[in-house]
């Protein structure tokens, strides 16, 4: 089938699901790629936990941070909103830095990520990205700032009101009255930049090999499996990924490694126009689009 026709059909599918998106699939062996609007900049939400992991692990490797060192956390200090992990703790805890990395990356624990940001602030994570040659991702703030959105002002049954505030307010330049959705104030990036980061981790040149291997392992242990995983994980392939979710944003980036040795980096960044927190149709549509781009590229 003609590639342009495929792209048109996939754009239509996204639109029917109430989505617009930025997608890119890249063959890590050849560099060939196929995408939909891959250079559109969007807030990246929890995807920022991947470069955070790189930054922390580099400092563990060179001795600036002790991976076995423990951090004392009390409920009063665990203020980052989140659905899992430390954000739900009611009692004090002592947790090693390397265990915080697991919680932050594999469980997407916001409080664990903020404990790590206390060791490596956003500006230093940015510097690590630049050193790795990944200049299309910008890290500006911690997870605590990320979650201070209108969603916190509503009861769960009123989540649609927060989503309504988020939808339709973006400017032509991707500004937004909600700071966490404004690409000039939020942690931001593009599908292409995310794929560049994945390539730097799976084909390490400027990221230390041991660090890249540890981040790959953490992404392989991702427990959030409802988005792209059903279309990429099988007995004949391994899917390692990280999701990002904030209001009407739904993202996932990852690498699928096939039994024949081929590897594809995939980034799917989406915005929804449907004012609802739970959207299985949107999740299924973004997975189908990512898989279709992958299959089209692999068929070459």
Image (cartoon, rainbow, N blue to C red):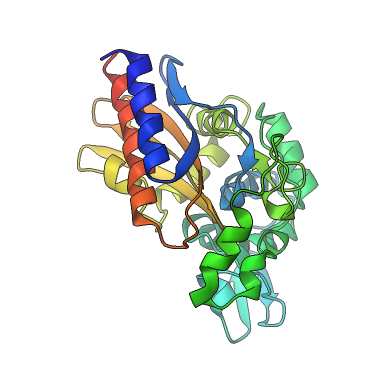
**Which residue: 53% across, 73% down?**
158
**Which residue: 57% across, 46% down?**
50
Considering only vertical position in the picture, is 155 above or below 47? Answer: below
> In the current view of this chain or complex, which residue is farthest to the bottom?
91
In the picture, the quarter occupied by the N terminus is: top left
Q: Is residue 10 left or right of residue 259?
A: right
- Where is residue 102 drawn, in percent x and y? 51, 59
Q: Is residue 216 left or right of residue 12?
A: right
Residue 289 location, quadrant: top left
- Where is residue 42 drawn, in percent x and y? 62, 40
Considering only vertical position in the picture, is 138 above or below 258? Answer: below
Residue 40 location, quadrant: top right
- Where is residue 157 drawn, in percent x and y? 49, 76
Considering only vertical position in the picture, is 73 above or below 48? Answer: below
Considering only vertical position in the picture, is 299 above or below 127? Answer: above
How many numbered discs sit on the rendered protein? 0
- Where is residue 3 drawn, in percent x and y? 34, 15
> In the current view of this chain or complex, which residue is farthest to the left?
235
In the picture, the quarter occupied by the C terminus is: top left
**Which residue: 71% across, 46% down?**
182
Residue 232 location, quadrant: top left
Question: As rendered, which of 284 and 263 lies closer to the eye?
Answer: 284
Question: As rendered, which of 30 and 22 lies closer to the eye?
Answer: 22
**Which residue: 53% across, 27% down?**
38
């Amino acid at each position: 089938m003609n590639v342009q026709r495929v792209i048109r059909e996939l754009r239509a599918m996204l639109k029917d699901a109430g989505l617009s998106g930025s997608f890119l699939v890249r063959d890590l062996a050849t560099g060939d790629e196929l995408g939909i609007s891959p250079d559109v900049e969007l807030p990246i939400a929890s995807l920022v936990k991947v470069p955070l992991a790189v930054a922390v692990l580099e400092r563990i490797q060179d001795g600036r941070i002790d991976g076995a060192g423990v951090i004392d956390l009390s409920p009063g200090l665990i203020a980052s909103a989140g659905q899992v992990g430390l954000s739900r703790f009611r009692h004090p805890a002592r947790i090693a830095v390397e265990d915080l990395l697991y919680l932050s990356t594999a469980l997407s624990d916001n409080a664990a990520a903020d404990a790590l940001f206390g060791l490596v602030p956003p500006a230093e994570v940015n510097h690590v990205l630049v050193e790795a040659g990944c200049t299309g991702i910008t890290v500006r703030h911690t997870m605590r700032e990320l979650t201070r959105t209108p969603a916190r002002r509503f009861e769960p049954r009123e989540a649609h009101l927060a989503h309504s505030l988020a939808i339709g307010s973006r400017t032509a330049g991707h500004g937004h009255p909600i700071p966490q959705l404004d690409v000039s104030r939020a942690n931001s990036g593009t599908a292409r930049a995310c794929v560049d980061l994945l390539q730097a981790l799976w084909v390490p040149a400027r990221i230390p090999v041991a660090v890249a291997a540890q981040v790959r392992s953490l992404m392989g242990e991702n427990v959030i499996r409802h988005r792209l995983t059903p279309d990429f994980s099988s007995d004949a392939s391994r899917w390692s990924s990280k999701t990002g979710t904030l209001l009407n944003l739904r993202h996932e980036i990852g690498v699928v490694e096939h039994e024949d040795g081929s590897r594809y980096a995939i980034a799917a960044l989406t915005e929804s126009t449907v004012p609802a927190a739970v959207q299985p149709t949107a999740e299924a549509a973004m997975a189908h689009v990512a898989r279709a781009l992958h299959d089209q590229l692999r068929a070459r």
